[in-house]
Structure formats: structure tokens, C-alpha cells
Amino acid sequence: MAFRDDNPETANVTAMFDAALAAAVSHAAFGLPQHGHIRQTEIVKDLFEGHFESATTVAQAFKGALLGIGVAEAVDGEVVAFDDTVWRVPVDGIPVVAEPALGLPFSVVAFGGTEITETVPTGTDFAGLTALIDGVLKAAGQHHDHCVAAIRVDGTFTEMLLRSEPRQTPPFRPLTEVLDHEVQFPFATWAGTLVGFRFPDVNDQVVIPGLHLHGVGADRRSGGHCHRAVTVEATLQIWLDDVDIFVPMTGVHYGVEAPGEVAERPNAGALKAPEGKPSGGSNPSLAASSINPRLR
Ligand SMILES: [Zn+2]
């Protein structure tokens, strides 16, 4: 089926998309074994514009997940998942196990793949961790701007800075205004698990660029979005994955679509997902704007 690009919303998203998906699609097309799968629900642009209503649920998004991150409905906490548990870290910074019915306006979830394990040198900060990940990707024949990797770091850290933000009430404000009131949780030393993703360094308003990690402490008494961390002793796990970005409001998928999902949507088929390679290129007006660095 041909992709209809006369719908402004769909055309917009397609134009924004970058090489990561092209790589993911070709990866899937060649049928390479053992690759995992990343499912992102919703695009960052909508989150930034204050669409904090539920687009999926914990049960839908995280069933069978290896790891994942997200934000709770009405921005009522940062979401982080690993070891078969999904936590919500509300504004008090204390993780609670998320209810399966909890709504999520945005989530990114990984479902496995080929695992690569590395020891992280002591004193590695976020920039160093990103460089380490990129080096691992390069050694695996991948470039960080052409793939998406699921990340897990277990260990002890210094200079840890986590954050959450207060629950919002409609009418919702843009996310940048919400983050002006974020609550930060600094820890001189911290032990726990960080999970998330290394996305390409693109400000396409579809994905959150760069390294994005959420954490939960080993004692399960702290957690949130991770602004900063320096390793003392840590192990890095990386899974190379294909990626599927699903925009529920339009029914549009980018990448590898989960069988049957579109058919379950009330507006299924209203818009067609692109087949094969996306049209590529960047939309200059969108490329000129940037993702808030506090999301990274
Ligand atoms: Zn985050």
C-alpha cells in the first residue's frame, strides 16, 4: 500500500524521521536473527505540547518487557521497568509498583535481543558512558546515529542526580513549564539500576535523542529520571534492537508493527504506515527546534 503523505500530521512525522528507523526497517527486512525489539508509544512532540493523557497502559506497554521507561498519566511520576517489575516514581521520589491499569502518555520499552555486557571504568560520567556505548555499537558494526540500543547499568555511583515532577491537572501546560518545577534528588553515593535507551543524536521531535536513563535504587527507596551519575563500580548491558514507534491517536506505526495491534484500534486504517524505507530527510522547521536538554 502506498503511504499517503497528504495528511499533514502523518507527513510531518514521516518527514521528521531519521536514519534510525531506516536502519531498523532494513534490519528487519533482512531477517537477521536474535535482534530485539523496541516499542515506543507516542512521539516526544506530543508530550512536549502537554498531551499527558493516557496513550497506553502499564499492562499493554510492559507485558513481556526486558526493560523500559515512561511517564505516568498527568505526569504523575517517572516510570521505570526491569526484572519483571514496573515502578512509578512520584514527586516524593519513593518508587511504588505501578498498577497494570496505570495510563501512560509516553513509553519506550525493549523486548530483548542480542546482549552485550561490558564493565564500566570507575569515574565514568554520562558523556563517558555514552562514548562507551557508542564504542560497543561500533565494534558490533553499528553506528549510534543509525540504530537504537536498550541500556542497563547496574552498580554503585557517585554524584547521582535523579528527578521526578508534580502531578498535573488539566488544562495541561507544556512539558517545559512542568519541568521548571521538577523535584531533584541528589545522592553523594547511590547503588541501583539504571535502564533506558541510546537513541540517535537527532532533534526530530519523534524520539528523545542521546542517552536517556531512569533508575531505581537497590533498596527500592529512591528513583526517577537520571540527570547525572558517575560510576564507581558498574556493569553495562546493551541490546541491539529494531524499533517500532506507534502513535495511537493516528494509528500510525513506524518500523515493525506488532501483528493485530492496528486492527484493535478504533481508528485503524485511517492512516497508513509507510512501507519500506521512510521518505527520510529532515524537516528544516522542526530540525531547527531542539528537545529540552532536561529530558535527556
Ligand atoms: Zn526520563
Image: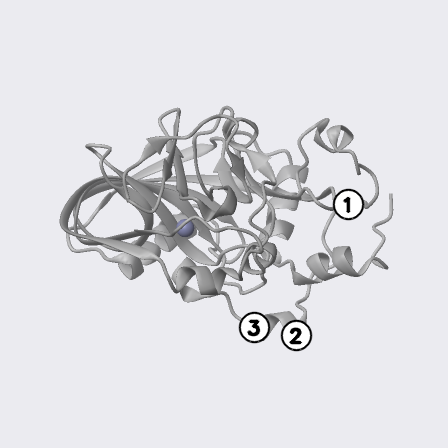
Residue 235 falls in which quadrant of the image?
A: top left
Q: Earlier in the sequence, mark 3 or mark 2?
A: 2
Which is closer to the viewer, label 1 or label 2? 2
Q: Residue 289 carries which label?
A: 3
Which is closer to the viewer, label 3 or label 1? 3
Mark 1 lies on residue: 275
Secondary structure, mark 1, is loop
Secondary structure, mark 3, is loop
Mark 2 lies on residue: 284
Answer above or below: position of 72 versus 65. below
Answer above or below: position of 1 versus 133. above
Q: Distance between the residues labelled 3 and 2?
A: 9 Å
What residue is shown at x 84% (from left), y 43% (from top)? 270
The x and y percentages for residue 26 are: 65, 45
Q: In this view, does 22 lie to the left or right of 272?
A: left
Three-letter residue code for mark 3:
Ser
